[in-house]
Image (cartoon, helix red, strand yellow):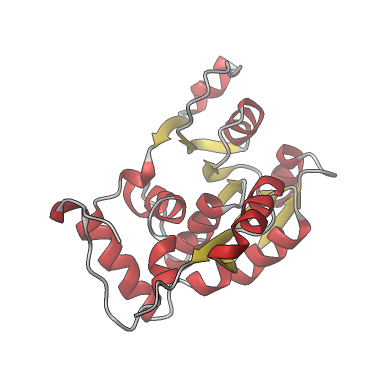
Amino acid sequence: MAVVPERQVVPIDDDVPLEIGALLGCGVTTGLGAVTNITEVASGDTIAVFGCGGVGAGVVLAANAVSAGEIIAVDLDADTLATMRELGATHTVDASTTDPVAAIGDYAGGVDYAFECIGSPTTVEQSVQTLGPGGTAVVTGTSDSDPVELDLGLFTSGIEIVGNIVGFTRPHVDIPRYITMYQNGDLDLDAILTAQYELEDLDTAFGALETGEGIRNVVRFDPGP
């Protein structure tokens, strides 16, 4: 239990499992908001998602919900990419074996939106390189200060780079909206809840986090009566 300011609390319907509500606390919401708040992804638009953890999964879910056209998911883990296909990705790229910039060029030429969900200089550069004329790259904010190298010639095609901090989420507006979308079957949050751990298994849960196992895991605690 915790005592928190009332303005920090967003009520959800009793029929929504708490482990699903927990997913909307940070990472997944950051991805959802990247599509629904920061950009104007529309039906038929082509997008690429670099990094398909909680943030990237949120992007794929939201892009599918707005009927984006080609949804290209890029990650290093085959199981994660398989889950992205379940969530609506039309193409997947295993960046451990394939150059994602070349692969996305083969699939789509240039994308309308590229979502960088890792915070790595390499993936930031790659996301920008995949944009078509007038495209937008959305970069999730990190605390790292590593430099990024970009070809200034790319900007002559009218591309744009914007930052993403928690999806510019308005909790009391967006979280109820996402809950409604989940209840209506438009956001398959169940598919990204990879595992649930009891409190006594906390070490195992942290081990899974360190190895990148799963997309989103939840630790449960039942204090009893």
- Establish if 111 lies above or below 77: above
Query: Please, which residue is most extreme toward the front here?
Result: 225
Rendered location of residue 221, percent (x, y)? 46, 68
> Between residues 45 and 88, which one lies in front from this camera angle?
88
> Between residues 66 and 199, which one lies in front from this camera angle?
199
Task: Tell me if I can see residue 32 in this picture.
Answer: yes
Pick the quarter of the image with the C terminus: bottom left
Query: Please, which residue is most extreme toward the right here?
Result: 97
Query: Please, which residue is most extreme toward the bottom here?
Result: 15
Residue 154 horizontal side relative to residue 167, left or right: right
- Establish if 225 lies above or below 70: below
Rendered location of residue 37, percent (x, y)? 32, 49
Picture quadrant of residue 181: bottom left
Residue 136 horizontal side relative to residue 209, left or right: left
Pick the quarter of the image with the N terminus: bottom left
How many numbered marks are there? 0
Rendered location of residue 90, percent (x, y)? 65, 63
> Could you tell me which residue is drawn at 58 percent across and 39 percent down?
118
> Could you tell me which residue is drawn at 44 percent across and 61 percent down?
23
Task: Tell me if I can see residue 46 in this picture.
Answer: no
> Between residues 155 and 197, which one lies in front from this camera angle?
197
> Could you tell me which residue is drawn at 57 percent across and 37 percent down?
131
Picture quadrant of residue 130: top right
Rendered location of residue 99, percent (x, y)? 79, 39
> Could you tell me which residue is drawn at 57 percent across and 61 percent down?
217
